[in-house]
Amino acid sequence: MPARRRLQRVHDMNIVTEHKISGEPIDTKAPKRPVRPVLWFIIVGTLLAVLVGGLVWFNYFRGQMIKQFFANNKPPPTAVSAAEAKSEVVPNLLTAVGGLVAVHQVDVSADVNGRVTEIKFEPGTRVEAGTPLVQMFDAPEQGDLANYKAQATVAQLSLDRAKQLASRQFGPQATVDTAQAAYDQAQAGIAKTEALISQKLVRAPFSGDLGVRKVEVGQYLTAGTAIVSLTDLSELWANFTVTEKDSGNLKVGQTVRLKVDAYPGRVFEGKITTIEPQISADTRNIRVQATIANPEKILKPGMFVTTTVVLPDKPAVITVPETAVDYTLYGDSVFVITEKKEADGKTSLSAVRTFVQTGNRVDGRVEIIKGIKPGDKVVAVGQLKLQSGAAVSISTDPAPQIPAQPPRY
């Protein structure tokens, strides 16, 4: 057999016919088997668990360190001014607003028409009742007065003669009656003319202070034209109104205290003299009038006044300084100072916010209806820097005065 055929036979026998031998080349490498997915999930999950655990431990460790830091570094107590809640009788006051009017005040005017011939007063001076103020032209009336006086003289003489003759039975009684009537008529003319003359001389109707002059010499006045104002300042009326609800607490004779802007800090006192018997149907208010003595004449009609009626006292109530109350939309509150013992045996003070129900405010103090009891210490100044439970220390500095503190009644 030729050598070429033997080689081909050997080749075919090794590659194709040999048992358990594939037809692939002998030098080809088998591929690697892939890693299972479960193994990858285990690895990634382990890494995430370690990472999350590390973050949790870090946050816990940081929180403990911060807590320990603040526990060992407490801020110093806040210095505040303290005041004690007192049980006291608060004046029962009813406040209202009103105005002043003079008991006697008028614009002096003429009763008749006429021309001013003389002004007999100085503006701003005080005059007594009956003092002449303005003289008006009265020459015609003076002439009529002289005429009537002459007639009266003639009538008097005729009456005397008629009476003498009648007494001697030389004249009738009718002559006496006629003479008497003529005399009476002359006297009536005199009285009427004197009244007209008196109207031409304008006098002060009462004692008081004159105001600004409103006329001039030569000016023709008509009846009712204002000449000058005349005011008696020795006594004034204070008119004010109160609500229907408060009207039942008012009585004639109750004391009324007044304050005016012109004299801050001063209090003027009077008595209720009139209470309107009718309540206004429009406002449901009642009008009240008090009489005020004004010996210094410093109060003027027209002044705006704040009136305070002193009512009978109420039972004692709890009060605190007005500065101690914190007014918010959530309610009124105060900081009550409490004492507690620390672990080392020392005593510390803390301020706890306590909500209260407030009432009236009088003389810089607030009535506390509910929330605290007498003897409790509250923060009077410095509560704006506090939170409930904050440590405080009581300052030895005196508390500042309340701005615009009203006088005590």
Image: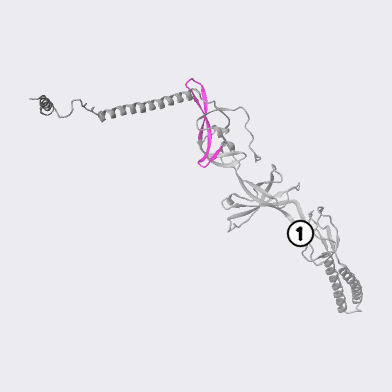
Reading the image, the residue beneath label 1 is: 107
> Where does the N terminus fall, quadrant-wise?
top left
Q: Position of residue 321 (x, y in %)?
A: 59, 36
Q: Is residue 104 visible?
A: yes
- Above or below: residue 371 compared with residue 121: above
Numbered disc total: 1
Residue 262 rendering spot, x and y as whole percentages: 71, 46
Which quarter of the image is occupied by the C terminus? top right
Q: What range is drawn magenta here?
A: 325-353
Image quarter for residue 160? bottom right
In-front residue for pair 23/275: 23
Q: Between residues 381 and 159, which one lies in front from this camera angle?
A: 381
Q: Position of residue 389 (x, y in %)?
A: 50, 30
Q: Amino acid at mark 1?
A: Asp
Q: Quadrant of residue 45?
A: top left
Q: Main secondary structure of the magenta part?
A: strand
Q: Is residue 400 above or below residue 237?
A: above
Answer whether residue 285 is magenta in the image: no
Secondary structure state at the residue bearing disc 1: strand
Residue drawn 83% across the image and 61% down it: 216
Q: Position of residue 232 (x, y in %)?
A: 76, 53
**Front-lying residue, 263 or 172:** 263
